[in-house]
Image: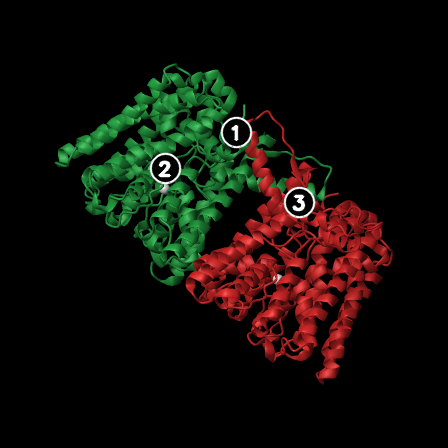
Chain colours: A green, B red
């Protein structure tokens, strides 16, 4: 049977379902946390138990159907399929409690699925108009889904599931956002995944404690321990959900500055951060070309926003700098927090923020979008090919941090960027076609912004969907388009796009 | 001296100036035509004589300074410099008569240079609010600059200048918009250039006669012989200037349909057209993958606009089809004519038109932008690299019309597209920075549209700069940015971008 299916398909579906099942079984355990919150808050606990049971049950069922341990058959193509399916299915179970609990603002399945996808992909866009009216368990689950999805369910699975010893490297390579080097970061791939998650947990704890201390010291009375955890975990995931309708504007300037630092740190490659913290290699960090370009982008973006704000006269002094730095950092790292309604700012800020949505944070961080290292490589490709245009017979390699980047990696970078821009354009067009169909008022710019923000896993966009608005006015089909864009952005498109090629399914 | 300059610089500036001088000497002759028009219209002729004299004089001076015949020293790099300089300098002389004649709407040098650049690059955007109030010679010169620039001054120079026998092939290859094959189109490169120009002249004559007959037959009383020539030449150049403030809306539906056909034909690769017309190879045209994709894009674009127009209820029946087909063809082929103010249409039309600005016509046509063949190659690159992602060890070539495209050509395509998008983004940002600086009201979308339209050599954009508006409200610096974008778009960026690399100037 297996042999025959293999020969017909070329992809070992049994191994794929086995692995997806293994992940789902464990995802079910995550529902224990919101169940406890519901219990203490006096809310119904059965929706959370049911969703957790459904996830684990589905996982067990898939395990049964594929009772052999086949994870060693996870090749390149099986890996793509696992990644595509995990990120498609986990939000299905994540959305269940929203629907089951009859949460009025999330009762439509398409809305609930959007919210869960936005949560797990650490996007942070919302269809909920009044965040503060959500139940406490729902609030908590939104933040937790960010945090679990930020460093990644698959990385977590590699850290804890023994069956991933063999296929894990390929999975981790595909899953770790952007091209980065896994070498010398752990003796085994499992150790690497564990190191990543330990660092993530550690940094989240530190950020939570620092924010909570600001509250305890009376510097920011609004910063309760729960708010500290909610915002620290959301910032570490570069997610953007906040239990506050005002987002981070609800907190004192000192908390806002702390969150700028948390976002900047979370936007750095975790492999680099690990070396800095555990191996005292701070110099390596400052010499790293991606880190430098990342810093350069942040400074230029902040300066552009500052120019806008100072000329408009709406802000001055420290507040102008803080508003600029916060919004620039939040959008560029693809977090999506806000301390001001930037949809009211001028064209310079608007264009800057739209362009930032295409920048993203570093490879190996929790952020989305194109990512700084790819921009670095594109710059280098352009420089190399221009030199070649002038001197056709001179062969020049592309280097990153002094090391030659192989042509295969350059082609992958170009492939991703082309796919990214193509899906973005198609998404924008889909949104305006649907707006025309349903008669919903949606400007061309707002459609472009919503598509850019969703595929970049940023979250807020422009117009109605600004940082203090929501995607509630979008039709069901548009909501589905945005959900698909978030999914494609999180898996970095290729694992889904290959499924559409004929050669993928051939032996 | 020469040897030393060569060893210091690596680029033979003497040969470059010699060639630029040769081109300018002949460009001066073009001013005879508007001088005659001014004479018959009773307008001052000295501005036209002075400008023509200045062009030819500068050409002769450059010839003197570089008195040896050095065109055989035109290599790859010298070719880039010639192209960059010719397209920068010719509009300088083209703008002179606007300033000298004291034309009130073009008296500022920056505006006059914009208008001349828009003319020669066949862009068709204008800073003139009331076209019909321009003098007759100015009207004529605007149309003539389109027509001369459309097929290209450099192609014309190759056809007529004996000194271009050797370096001509490289120049023609760089100058002929987009990657295309020059083989089997003429025994010598000079014959190729002559064939191109003969075909261009012939098609312009046919289009003029057809349009004029519509006038003679009384089917469209507005279509005088002058209007027929003005619109036929503008359409053949995919330019977009019209002596009518209403553009093509001033004419009857039959004239509009004829112009749709002219634009579609002018947007096809002239090498293919030549084979169809002179070698009866019509089947080859229909089998050509670029032609098919070109047709496909036009049909989809027309359908999207039609959906918008029918739902809005503003148009019905033949008029809805005509308005959709006309605007889709005009924007996609980068012509820029209009039969309606599309800035009043809905978001679906707006996004469609913005995306069309990035499509362009075929390689080897007179159009601008990215061009269909590059989109075809990008699709193929994506398909190939996706197959490679699933099967890392299988090497698959990219084919066009069944023939393998070499990797160098693919890399050039990617290089161009990356540069194009980068310059477009930078241009958009420049426009909003300047709008912020000057306090001019310019929305983010309008800035993006203006940059896209200018670099794509389309012409009209959105907002104030729509098809029935002008760029008059843009500040001097913004006008200069748009002028630079038109220039970069016309030379396809690479010839200018290489000048900024250090290796270009090295021996
Ligand atoms: K986000
Ligand atoms: K044009």
Judge depth for marks 3 and 1 and give the one in front. 1
Q: Between marks 2 and 3, how big is the CA–CA gap?
A: 43 Å
Judge depth for marks 1 and 2 and give the one in front. 1
For mark 1, does the 10 Å Cα neighbourhood hold few (<14), some (14 to 19), or many (20 or more) residues? many
The residue carrying mark 1 has its beta carbon less than 8 Å from ligand 1: no
User: In which quadrant of the rendered view does residue B95 lie?
Assistant: bottom right
Give yes or no for contact between labels 3 and 1 (Cβ–Cβ under 8 Å): no
Residue A504's tag is 1
Residue at image point 39% right, 15% down? A69
The residue carrying mark 2 has its beta carbon less than 8 Å from ligand 1: yes
In depth, the one of B98 and B412 nearer the eye is B412
Dot 1 or dot 2, earlier in sequence: 2
Q: Mark 2 lies on which chain?
A: A
Question: Can you say whether A374 is above or below B392 in the image?
Answer: below
> Dividing the image into 4 quarters, which one contains the C terminus of chain A?
top right
For mark 2, does the 10 Å Cα neighbourhood hold few (<14), some (14 to 19), or many (20 or more) residues? many
User: In which quadrant of the rendered view does residue B44 lie?
Assistant: bottom right
Q: Residue furthest bottom?
A: B42
- Label 2 sits on residue: A121
Q: Mark 1 lies on which chain?
A: A
- Label 3 sits on residue: B502
Question: Can you say whether B3 is above or below B330 in the image?
Answer: above
- Residue B464 in view here: yes
Number of marks in the rendered image: 3
């Amino acid at each position: 049977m297996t042999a025959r299916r293999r020969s017909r398909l070329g992809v070992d579906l049994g191994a794929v379902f086995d692995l997806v099942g293994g992940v789902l079984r464990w995802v079910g355990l995550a529902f224990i946390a919101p169940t406890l919150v519901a219990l203490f808050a006096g809310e119904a606990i059965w929706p959370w138990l049911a969703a957790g049971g459904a996830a684990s049950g589905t996982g067990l069922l898939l395990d049964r159907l594929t009772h052999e341990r086949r994870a060693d058959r996870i090749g390149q193509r099986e890996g793509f399929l696992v990644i595509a399916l995990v990120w498609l299915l986990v939000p299905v179970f994540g959305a269940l409690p929203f629907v089951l609990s009859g949460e009025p603002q999330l009762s439509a399945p398409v809305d609930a699925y959007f919210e869960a996808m936005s949560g797990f992909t650490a996007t942070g866009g919302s269809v909920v108009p009044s965040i503060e009216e959500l139940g406490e368990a729902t609030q908590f689950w939104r933040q937790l889904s960010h945090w679990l999805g930020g460093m990644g369910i698959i990385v977590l699975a590699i850290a804890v599931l023994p069956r991933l010893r063999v296929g894990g490297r390929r999975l981790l390579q595909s899953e770790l956002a952007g091209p980065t080097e896994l070498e010398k970061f752990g003796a085994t791939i499992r150790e690497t995944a564990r190191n990543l998650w330990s660092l993530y947990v550690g940094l989240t704890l530190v950020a939570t404690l620092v924010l909570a201390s600001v509250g305890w010291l009376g510097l920011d009375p609004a910063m309760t321990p729960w708010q500290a955890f909610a915002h620290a975990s959301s910032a570490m995931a570069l997610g953007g959900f906040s239990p506050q309708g005002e987002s981070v504007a609800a907190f004192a300037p000192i908390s806002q500055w702390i969150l700028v630092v948390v976002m900047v740190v979370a936007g750095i490659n975790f492999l680099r951060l690990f070396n800095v913290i555990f191996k005292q290699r701070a110099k390596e960090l400052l010499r790293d070309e991606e880190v430098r370009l990342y810093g350069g982008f942040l400074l230029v973006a902040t300066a552009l926003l500052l120019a806008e704000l100072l000329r408009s006269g709406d802000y001055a002094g420290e507040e102008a700098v803080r508003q600029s730095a916060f919004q620039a950092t939040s959008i560029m790292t693809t977090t999506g927090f806000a301390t001001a309604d930037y949809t009211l700012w001028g064209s310079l800020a608007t264009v800057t923020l739209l362009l930032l949505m295409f920048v993203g944070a570093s490879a190996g961080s929790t952020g989305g979008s194109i990512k700084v290292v790819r921009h670095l490589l594109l710059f280098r490709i352009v420089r190399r090919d221009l030199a070649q245009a002038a001197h056709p017979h001179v062969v020049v390699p592309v280097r990153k941090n002094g090391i030659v980047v192989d042509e295969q990696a350059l082609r992958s970078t170009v492939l991703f960027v082309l796919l990214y821009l193509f899906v973005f354009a198609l998404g924008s067009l889909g949104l305006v076609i649907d707006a025309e169909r349903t008669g919903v008022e949606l400007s061309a710019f707002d459609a472009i912004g919503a598509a850019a923000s969703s595929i970049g896993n940023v979250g807020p966009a422009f117009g109605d969907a600004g940082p203090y608005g929501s995607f509630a006015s979008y039709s069901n089909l548009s909501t589905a388009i945005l959900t698909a864009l978030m999914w494609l952005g999180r898996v970095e498109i290729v694992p889904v796009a290959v499924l559409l090629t004929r050669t993928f399914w051939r032996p």
